[in-house]
Amino acid sequence: MEKRQERASGIELLRIACMLMIIAHHYFVHGGFSTASIAVNRGQGMFVQMLQMFGRPACLIFALTSGYFLVGRSRERHGRRIVPLLAEQWFYSVAILVVVLAFRLRSVSPLEAVCSLVPALFGHWYIVGYLMLYILIPFLDPWLRSMEKRTNRRLLLALFLLWSVIPTFTLYDWHFDERDLFPVMYLIGGYIRLHGEGKYPNGRNLAVSLGSAGLMLLSVALINTWGYRVRNADIVGWATYFGDYNSTPGVVFAVSTFLFFSRLGFTSRTVNGLAGSMVGIYLLHDDDLIRELLWKGLSPNAAHISSVWVHEPVKVLAVFAVCLAIDLLRRATVERVFLKGFKRLCAAWDRKHTPAGQRR
């Protein structure tokens, strides 16, 4: 029997790193830090602002990865990927609702209960955006694959200018939504998959990634310094401006970082196995019902701003580890049973709808 080939682990390792970036981002944005406390605690405030800068570019990387792997796949394979994802989302949403109600961790309104029971429509914005992308893929995919490389490149350049460069450097509100990142990143990932990653050395990708990351961190330092000198807390609040979803340095960081990791030629079953839990970690730690409890109730983030050098890394790693352990348990039990039943249903569907002469 032919031995099954393991997936390359560079992109899987990047998924793990991105989830840590997202948790660090949530530590700040959901942690109850006021602009005044950030301004008073200069070094500590700048530290948490810098660590949260990469959470949204990490979301770009996840969406770009989807485009890279999904382009050119059949509609059946698209559908068979989204069903387990929606099932995982529903499982965690309902499980968290049951735990919160059973242990009376907080009050739950009727509207919140409905949202938890139907998370595909009212749940995490990222999963909703991902579902929207899946609906659009049957239309985007043939169009993308039929496009000449030169035309495709021009399209991406136009999108980059309209979606990222102009809004970033003109401060003009073009009314883009965070879900807009999905089709844009899908097209970028699809281009990389269809036309290659470039013949230049991978060190160039690393240099661009580190350079754009350095510019993002430098912007935090410079804007904070300006705010401190003029004693204006509002200016300090603008320090994370270049960490937005369509920020030009963030987009450059996301694409170059993906290109670098996609060309790392190594394979690790451990890395691949852990990477399979990144969606579960996201669904667990950022659920609407427990978000405030996690960041403001349990060892409140804002109350530890004076010791944030230690508190943030420890809490981020603890959240990652606990959620990882829970999801590994789910995958070994609930998901295994679900996937067996789902595969049987898919096989039955194929037998019924595939002509006898085309069956393997």
Image: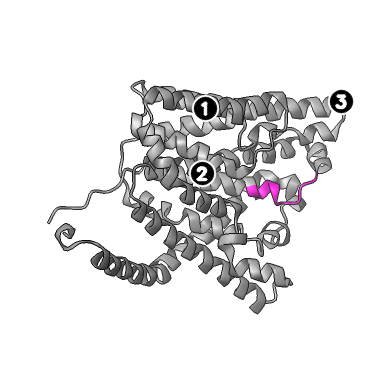
Q: Residue at x 17, y 57 (%)?
A: 358
Q: Earlier in the sequence, mark 1 or mark 3?
A: 1
Q: Is residue 42 above or below residue 329?
A: above
Q: Position of residue 322 (x, y in %)?
A: 53, 61
Can residue 124 be seen in this snapshot? Answer: yes
Occupied quadrant, residue 193: top left
Report the amino acid beneath label 3.
Val
Task: Between residue 66 and residue 223, name the one nearer to us.
Answer: 66
Q: Residue at x 87, y 30 (%)?
A: 231
Q: Which residue is mark 2?
A: 18
Secondary structure, mark 3, is helix
Q: What is the quadrant of the N terminus in the image?
A: bottom left
Q: Position of residue 327 (x, y in %)?
A: 47, 63
Q: Magenta stretch: residue 30 in it?
A: yes
Q: Which residues are magenta?
A: 26-34
Q: Residue at x 34, y 42 (%)?
A: 72
Compared across the picture, whether 37 is left or right of 240 comes to: right
Q: Earlier in the sequence, mark 1 or mark 2?
A: 2
Q: Position of residue 165 (x, y in %)?
A: 61, 25
Check disc 3: other Cα within 10 Å, few if <14, some if 14-19, many if 20+. Answer: few
Cα–Cα gap, marks 1 and 2: 15 Å
Mark linked to residue 210: 1
* Count of marks overlaid on the render: 3
Secondary structure, mark 1, is helix
